[in-house]
Image: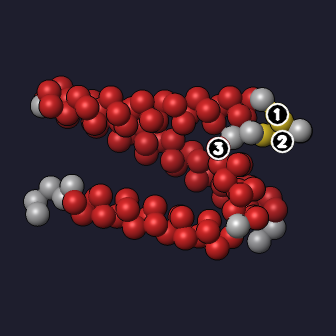
């Protein structure tokens, strides 16, 4: 895979991430409008979303040493130095999110 292809894939995945996370937060606020006890998840996840978005935006605008200082770029550099730990951490994150989806299953 060429350098430009990898950069394109990362950019497209970031757009998908931003849109789907925003949709998730909107659905949580709709749930809060229906059931007031959903305030904690709505505030919590929206707060995380806004914080990460601001840090990413700040990092994209402020260059450190001629390179972006975003969370994703930091992770990419760490992953290049520690590829095994990076794949293990991503795998554990994937398993945790899958377990969360199963745990929150609507009809189970």
Q: Is 46 above or below relative to 18?
A: above
Residue 67: give its label. 2
Is residue 30 visible from the viewing direction of this image? no
Secondary structure under badge 1? strand
Q: Residues within 10 Å of mark 2 (few under 14, many from 20)?
A: few
Give me the disc on residue 71: 3
Q: Residues within 10 Å of mark 3 (few under 14, many from 20)?
A: some
Position of 14 relative to 83 (above/below): above
User: Horizontal and vertical percent for residue 14?
Assistant: 59, 47
Q: Position of residue 24 (x, y in %)?
A: 35, 41
Tell me the residue that label 1 is attached to.
Answer: 63
Q: CA distance from mark 2 to mark 1?
A: 5 Å
Q: Residue at x 29, y 32 (%)?
A: 42
Using the rendered image of the protein, determine whether residue 107 is visible from the camera's viewpoint: yes
Circle 2/circle 1 CB separation < 8 Å: yes
| Mark pair 2, 3: CA separation | 12 Å
Q: Is residue 93 left or right of residue 52?
A: left
- The residue lying at 51 percent from left, 47 percent from top is 17
Q: Residue at position x 75%, y 64% from top? A: 80
Q: Is 83 or 57 nearer to us in this picture?
A: 83
| Contact check, label 3 and label 1, Cβ < 8 Å | no
């Amino acid at each position: 895979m060429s350098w430009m292809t990898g950069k394109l894939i990362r950019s497209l995945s970031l757009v998908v991430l931003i849109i789907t996370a925003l949709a998730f937060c909107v659905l949580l606020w709709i749930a809060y409008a229906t059931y007031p006890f959903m305030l904690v998840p709505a505030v919590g996840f929206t707060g995380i979303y806004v914080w990460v978005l601001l840090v990413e935006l700040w990092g994209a605008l402020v260059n450190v040493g001629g390179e972006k200082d975003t969370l994703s770029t930091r992770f990419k550099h760490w992953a290049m130095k520690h590829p095994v730990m990076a794949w293990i951490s991503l795998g554990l994150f994937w398993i945790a999110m899958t377990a969360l989806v199963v745990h929150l299953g609507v009809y189970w």
